[in-house]
Amino acid sequence: MLSATAWPASAVRIAKGEAVTFAHPTKQLSRAFCAGCGETLFGTNRLDMRVVPNALVARASGGVLPGNLSPTMHLFYRHRIIDVSDALTKYLEGWDGPELSQ
C-alpha cells in the first residue's frame, strides 16, 4: 500500500544530492532513487506526474503529513490487498477510470 501525492513534473525538484532513475521496461513509468541512500524519491506515471511518497513528505515535515496533503481518493482499488473503510472515492484503476460501485 502506498500513500502518495501526485504533482506536475515542473513542481518537483531535488534540492540536494542526485537521483538515479530507472524506467519500467514495458510501461510508461519510472522511479527516481537517491543516489546516496537509495530512498525512493518519486515515481513518474503515464501522465508525466511525479508521485511522491507521503512518508517522505512527512519525514521532511517533522514526522507529520501536512493537513493539506491528506488523502482524497484511492487509486488502483481493484488491486487492493485489504478493503479500506472510508468515504473517499475508490477508483478501480487510475483517476481517469471507473469508480467502485457500492
Image (cartoon, rainbow, N blue to C red):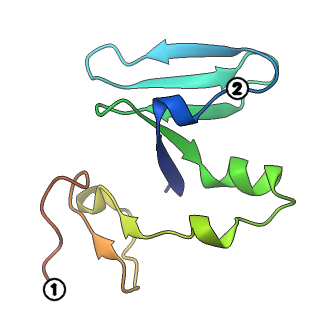
Dot label at residue 102? 1
Q: Residue furthest front?
A: 10
Q: Residue at x 38, y 63 (%)?
A: 81
Side of 69 where 55 appears, left or right? right
Neighbour tally class for label 2: few under 14, some 14-19, many 20 plus, Cα within 10 Å: few
Q: Residue 26: percent from the left, percent from the top?
A: 26, 17
Q: Closer to the camera: disc 1 or disc 2?
A: 2
Dot label at residue 60? none
Secondary structure at badge 2 equals: loop
Where does the C terminus fall, quadrant-wise? bottom left
28 in relation to 69, above or below: above
Side of 65 where 101 appears, left or right? left
Dot 2 amino acid type: Ile
Q: Which residue is mark 2?
A: 14
Quick one: 85 or 60, which is closer to the camera? 60
Q: Residue furthest right?
A: 62
Q: Residue at x 53, y 53 (%)?
A: 4
23 in relation to 74, above or below: above
Dot 1 amino acid type: Gln
Neighbour tally class for label 1: few under 14, some 14-19, many 20 plus, Cα within 10 Å: few
Side of 102 where 26 appears, left or right? right
Q: Residue at x 24, y 63 (%)?
A: 91
Q: Residue 64: percent from the left, percent from the top?
A: 78, 66
55 in relation to 9, above or below: below
Instruction: State which quadrant residue 46 falls in.
Output: top left
Secondary structure at badge 1 equals: loop
Q: Residue 23: percent from the left, percent from the top?
A: 42, 15
Quick one: 10 or 57, which is closer to the camera? 10
Instruction: State which quadrant residue 98 falls in.
Output: bottom left
CA–CA distance between discs 1 and 2? 41 Å
